Amino acid sequence: MSKEPVAVVGIGQTKHVAARRDVSIAGLVREAARRALDDADLTWADVDAVVIGKAPDFFEGVMMPELYLADALGAVGKPMLRVHTAGSVGGSTALVAANLVAARVHATVLTLAFEKQSESNAMWGLSLPIPFQQPLLAGAGGFFAPHVRAYMRRSGAPDTVGSLVAYKDRRNALKNPYAHLHEHDITLEKVQASPMLWDPIRYSETCPSSDGACAMVLTDRAGAARAPRPPAWMLGGAMRSEPTLFAGKDFVSPQAGKDCAADVYRQAGIADPRCEIDAAEIYVPFSWYEPMWLENLGFADEGEGWKLTESGVTELDGDLPVNMSGGVLSTNPIGASGMIRFAEAALQVRGQAGEHQVEGARRVLGHAYGGGSQFFSMWLVGSERPDA
Amino acid sequence: MTRDIALVAFAQTDHRRSSDELSEVEMLMPVLHEVLEQTGLKTADIGFTCSGSSDYLAGRAFSFTLALDGVGAWPPISESHVEMDGAWALYEAWTKLLTGDADTALVYAYGKSSPGSVRDVLTRQLDPYYLAPLWPDSVALAALQAQALIDAGDTDERALAAVAARSRADASANSHAQLARPVPQGDYLVQPLRTGDCPPIGDGAAAVVLAAGERARDLCERPAWIRGIDHRIEAHGLGVRDLTDSPSTRLAAQKAGAFERPVDTAELHAPFTSQEIVLRGALRLDDTVRVNPSGGALAANPIMAAGLIRVGEAAAAIHRGDSDRALAHATSGPCLQQNLVAVLEGDPR
């Protein structure tokens, strides 16, 4: 069984902002899709299928919005799939689209993820009460803060590490024209002086609430040969899930995340991710998740992730840059955030990342997670075709 | 495509008007256990898992995360979810098996319509700026389609009543059906549709197991091989569509190979009698084809699972030896906006 190699030949994003009042949901997604097609020098007619993802429908108050969006995305007369795997959805959506190419069901697939959070209220969307079930306490931050505390206790990390991540990501965002937060006057002191929201998570260590969309054009070898710009090749991709709540769950470093990374590395022939991967776009909605995920992804031994962050390894000019785009901490249209990680990884290996480009990036990881740290999706992309 | 993939097991709940005493997970668990028991597989043996459901029916965000707990996803599993009918989850699983990354897949879907007013809930599917604020409900939209058919001379109310009577009579052989008895055609709900032309509102779940190649033969005496599967979507706006036809169904059927040879059985996801008329036309089904021997969606229509159940019923007919080549259809969106067609075959006898 040989799979068709999958290439990313087009990437498009909207400028992410708190509220895009100038466009409808359809206008927002079409903007990103149009940019991805332009990047690939393709038209709507070149697209064989559309795979769309977003986080819960309650965020915009539209049930199964892909039905209404079919026209805006040129999907009429084509297959259209709608993926939903919580916060990991942007990554999962790209992987479902990639499978259509890998299985040779379709040659060229448009994949897109979006969130227009200003249409509704995400806090409300996450807080509908259900009998006999534990509510997420005070939004996502309330759920994740105790796990950050557990990490700090377990690893002995000094309590300054979180602010270093936030300061780095917000500075990186200044180099990314599509990033939501452009805090030109950011300083480490300002991050550390920002209000405490969910101890130990401060205001400046949390993600914003954004409107935005991200799209990619995925295609086969023949499609890649026609592409006007260098493609990014998928070297490996995987999803893993585990239950939300159970006695044996390790919320600091979930097994599903470890297994997912191991599967991706196996597919890509990576033995030592720290040495063989040049950069990573990791889903970090709260600053402390950078060191936590560095360990979960095998870039550092258990309890050592914070040392990479503290020593500057994950800075844009470091040895393993993380979240060159500014990451989820600077831009968070929830349903799109995972796909932005995947797309930014692809931009890097294509050499198209502009001011936040990592020189010579040849293999870059895109990572997403969702739910109560239970859904994971990842891909590794490279500048060289895997079977070449 | 170099790999043969088959449905090897199918299970469903008894569909009911209400299941207040059960959570979605509790409704789903027996079905998951049953479908795995049919194959002797355990959760850990499954290569890929995919589900279909809707947060809007559950009334809460991320509702599928709890269903995953019921699957027993420990150690962690390779898993995905579509916010669509389970038939599309089956499609995603089929592509996954085609890549060779997995040899078996578990697909499930569930929906509880009873907690809310499903006619109101489905209005939230519509264009949120121009259409949804008017709250046109699903029965009213189906009635527009039915009236267009009658105006075009494609059917009349008596023919629609005959579709309803045949479906519910056939359902008497289906112990899972919600309406497995003669149902009076009743008064107009929205003219020209009477209550008898409309599906029951109910709760239910279903699951299937897919397997590739020799694995399928190991797990099932007579696997239902997927010879083709395709799905297509149409424009959302009803004003730009010819409601008397279903070009997306026709195209999906053509891509799935449905017209290459006749089928003997068709399981159509037609919640309204008038939609069976549209689908029969698009799929070129004549009177030699057994349509909806299960009773179809007119006998049980658990939203988000009803399409997967059509594929499961078609496969089960092949498993039993009642069919050699069956067509299964699933739909989504107002007035048959999005349609999936699968062609299943048993080994020659």
Image: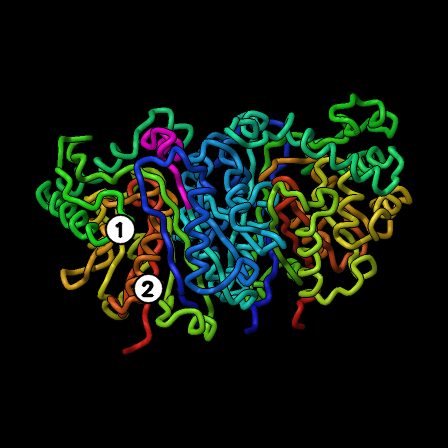
Q: Position of residue A89 (x, y in %)?
A: 57, 45
Residue that mark 2 sits on: B343
Which amino acid is tagged 2? Answer: Val
Colouring scheme applied when the structure was drawn: rainbow
Neighbour tally class for label 2: few under 14, some 14-19, many 20 plus, Cα within 10 Å: many
Query: Which quadrant holds residue A142?
Result: top right
Please state the chain letter of the residue tagged with numbered disc 2 in the rendered image. Answer: B
The region drawn magenta spans: B110-125
Residue A344 versus residue B227 in the image, above or below: above
In what quadrant of the picture does the C terminus of chain B appear? bottom left
Helix, strand or loop at mark 1? loop
Q: Is residue B154 visible?
A: no
> Which one is in front, A253 or B174?
B174
Indicate the quadrant where residue B253 lies.
bottom left
Cα–Cα gap, marks 1 and 2: 25 Å
The circle drawn on residue B196 is: none
Residue B175's label in the rendered image is 1
Q: Is residue B219 left or right of residue A195?
A: left
Relative side of A128 to A281, left or right: left
For the view shown, which residue lies furthest in the left direction? B158
